[in-house]
Every structure is written in structure tokens, then in C-alpha cells.
Image (cartoon, rainbow, N blue to C red):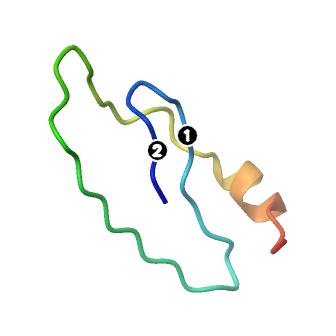
Amino acid sequence: MYIAAEVKHWHGAVKDEAFAHLSLTVPTEGASHEWLEPVTDEAYNKLKIQ
């Protein structure tokens, strides 16, 4: 999956499925990356497989 620079997005898993995340960041002039807010346990436990 390609995510353009400066686009807020979320990666995650549900409690009953495995999840692995590999991220490669390509330096882009004028762009930045940052870790955003964590998901609460309450929100995580409500997630369903789609």
C-alpha cells in the first residue's frame, strides 16, 4: 500500500488476528512523518474483522 506524504492514516489489528507492520519511509522534501495518538483498549476491543 502506498500512502502519500502528509496523509493521516491508521494501521492496526484486531485482537483475534495476527498483524505485522513493515514501514519504509522515503525522504520527501518539505514532508514529515509522526506517530499519532494511540488507540485506547476500549476502542481496540470494539474492532471487528471486515
Residue sitting nearer the eye, 25 or 42 = 25
Residue sitting nearer the eye, 27 or 14 = 27
Q: Is residue 11 above or below residue 13?
A: above
Categorize mark 2 by other alpha carbons within 10 Å: few (<14), some (14-19), many (20+).
few
The answer to which of marks 2 and 1 sits earlier in the sequence is 2
**Image location of residue 35, percent across then percent down:** 36, 36
Q: Which residue is mark 1?
A: 9
At 30% across and 31% down in the image, what residue appears? Answer: 33
**Image location of residue 18, percent across then percent down:** 56, 85
Cβ atoms at labels 2 and 1 below 8 Å apart:
yes
Q: Amino acid at mark 2?
A: Ile
Q: Amino acid at mark 1?
A: His
Side of 15 where 24 appears, left or right: left
At 32% across and 30% down in the image, what residue appears? Answer: 34
The disc at residue 3 is 2
**Image location of residue 6, percent across then percent down:** 42, 24
Image quadrant in which you'd find residue 9: top right
At 65% across and 85% down in the image, what residue appears? Answer: 17
**Image location of residue 21, percent across then percent down:** 40, 68
* Secondary structure beneath label 2: loop
Side of 47 where 11 appears, left or right: left
